[in-house]
Image (spheres, rainbow, N blue to C red):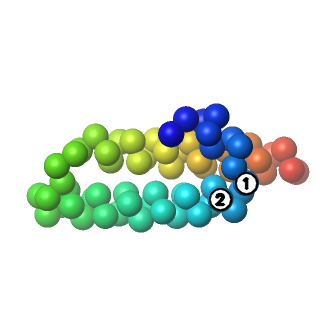
Amino acid sequence: MKFEDIRGKSNDELEEQLMNLKKEALNLRFQKASGQLENTSRMRLVRRDIARIRTALSFNQRAAG
């Protein structure tokens, strides 16, 4: 996911997507702990996507405030 794609979304969409990514990160951590995780690079991508969304949300809050 690129930052340009995130920038065009509303805050509600971003928060929903953030919640979904957090759930996915939790599931990936459980898979890693149980030894079932095959694609370890997915954890890194999910963490980065979470950071991108949080950054976009903070930009939106600063612009509104």
Q: Amino acid at mark 2?
A: Glu
At 73% across and 54% down in the image, what residue appears? 10
Please say if 47 is above or below 30.
above
- State the image coordinates of residue 59 (x, y, percent, origin top left): 74, 43
Q: How many numbered marks, from 0 up?
A: 2
Please say if 31 is above or below 46.
below
Residue at numbered disc 2: 13
Residue in the foreground of this view, choosing between 64 and 8: 8
- State the image coordinates of residue 24 (x, y, percent, origin top left): 38, 60
| Other-residue count near label 2 (Cα within 10 Å), few / some / many at <14 / 14–19 / ≥20 | few
Residue 3 placement, left or right of 25: right
- Circle number at residue 21: none
Secondary structure of the residue carrying tag 1 is loop
Cβ atoms under marks 2 and 1 closer than 8 Å: yes
Residue at numbered disc 1: 10
- State the image coordinates of residue 46 (x, y, percent, origin top left): 41, 48
At 59% across and 63% down in the image, what residue appears? 16
Secondary structure of the residue carrying tag 2 is helix
Residue 45 placement, left or right of 1: left
Cα–Cα span, label 2 and label 1 = 5 Å
| Other-residue count near label 1 (Cα within 10 Å), few / some / many at <14 / 14–19 / ≥20 | few
Q: Amino acid at mark 1?
A: Ser
